[in-house]
Amino acid sequence: MKTNPKPVSAKVDPFSDPETSNKMAIRALIPLLITFILGTLCLQGFNLVYTQVGADVGAPMQASLITAFPSIVLGIVCFIYGSLGDFVSLKKLVVLGLITLFVGSIFGFVANFYFTPNLWTVIIARVLQTAGEQVAGSVFLVIATKYLKEELKVIFFGLFTAGYQLSASIGVFSAGLLSAIAWQYLFLVPAVTILFLPLLLHSLPDKSSTGDKIDAAGFTIFGVAVAILTLFFTYMNWWMLAVALVLFCVFAIYINKAKNPFITPEFFKNTRWVLAISLILVFYSVNYCISPIFNAIGTTMYGMTTTKVSHYIVWAFVVAAIVGISSGAIVGKIGKQAGIYTAGTLMTIGWFGAAFSVESGFLQLTIFACVFYAGCGLMYSPVVSTVLGTVPKEESGRGVGMNDLIMNVTASIGISIIGSLMGANTLAGSSFTGATGDAASYANLMLICGCTAVLGLIVFTLFRRHIYRAK
């Protein structure tokens, strides 16, 4: 007698149901956030002590490379990870990222603690760590954008920036302590995130959004162009700018001719997105600069150690974390536009207030740093949700990637320019604030940073109606 075989039940994808996907997303977002916090903690720690590290490895004049190179890599992998979120399994991205982070952490500690510290072993380790840890940040944003309920997105964007600021505060504090012991221990901080891998593999979606092959050529052309452009602002060699412009032109031709480019020309023709992303281009251009400027002021003008400076600056990051946690509720009450105006105003007051307080004591400087970072903590949620709200859901990964690319590359360019001006002491002598000598240099640098915040407010005022118009 012939029997019918039992039907094989297809495996149900939990992310195909909105309610289930929302719960799974929240379960994945927590370990991703912790991983991002620990990776950023390491980044901010090295931002504070890179001049000391440069001196210890016998390369004080090249110390800024310890921050510049990882920042370049950060911008590129932000873009790649975010964009790949539209094409490949997020599980594969997480495995690649966390293993790279772990390898970089162990290599950096062993190579510079048990052997003679070297500039390039520090840079290589920081590049690996940066490339690895950003997987958590990019996948967090892709998951939040694609799978969370609309009312939860602003809240989790707020938690994301709060996590960033919290990690920055702990990073500054721990860097200040470890600089008095051995800065090499900073490398080990994010190594423990490898323990989250089993949980993340269980909670993340395993599907690819398309059957198309990954556009390796497009990623390569664009990534190299961005890297060379950022290096131009570090070394100011004009041939680098020329090469970068040529590569961007090649990329423009490529995406118009290629059969399946990872990003189409239509993406860049979205004027709402172009205008929205310009806000990040301006507001975040000097985001990394306050820690090195304040460290230089504390050590050269007030005779403070890096450890003591960190005890002051840490409170600015704590304020940013508190405001970041509250930003979802604040923006929900006053709206995105009012949130951006408020945040930009706080950033402006913070920079200009600090510029006029260089010689008024480090406590007063710290108060204005708190005002600035309150603006940073409030800014992220409304500006990122504004930018991502201008792109279709199916392109949200590429939206996240371009958002992170602009945010991190402009910040790395900003710290390269400000760091070069600070190192060359070209702005010393006199200042509009009344300061003279070295104090004038620091005041002028902060006036420049304050002007970027003012420019951001002007840009937003000019373009906000177009940005928020109906699709």
Image (spheres, rainbow, N blue to C red):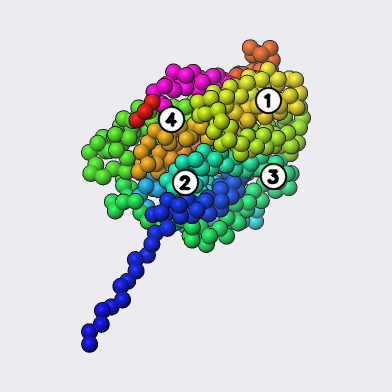
Residue at x-position 63% and y-position 38%:
321
SS at circle 1:
helix
Residue where numbered disc 2 is placed: 148
**Is the residue under label 4 in contact with that under label 2 (CB below 8 Å)?**
no
- The answer to whether 5 appears left or right of 45 in the picture is left
Q: Which residues are magenta?
A: 448-468
Using the numbered discs, state the Cα–Cα distance from disc 4 to disc 3 in whole angstroms: 33 Å
Q: Is disc 4 surrounded by few (<14), some (14 to 19) or many (20+) residues within 10 Å? A: many
Q: Which of the marked residues, 4 or 3, is nearer the chain's N terminus?
A: 3
Residue where numbered disc 3 is placed: 174
**Is the residue under label 2 in contact with that under label 1 (CB below 8 Å)?**
no
Q: Quadrant of residue 306?
A: top right
Q: Compared to 92, does 428 lie above or below? A: above
Q: Which of the marked residues, 1 or 4, is nearer the chain's N terminus?
A: 4
Q: Is disc 3 surrounded by few (<14), some (14 to 19) or many (20+) residues within 10 Å? A: many
Residue where numbered disc 4 is placed: 277
Q: Which of the marked residues, 1 or 2, is nearer the chain's N terminus?
A: 2
The answer to whether residue 52 is seen in the rendering is no
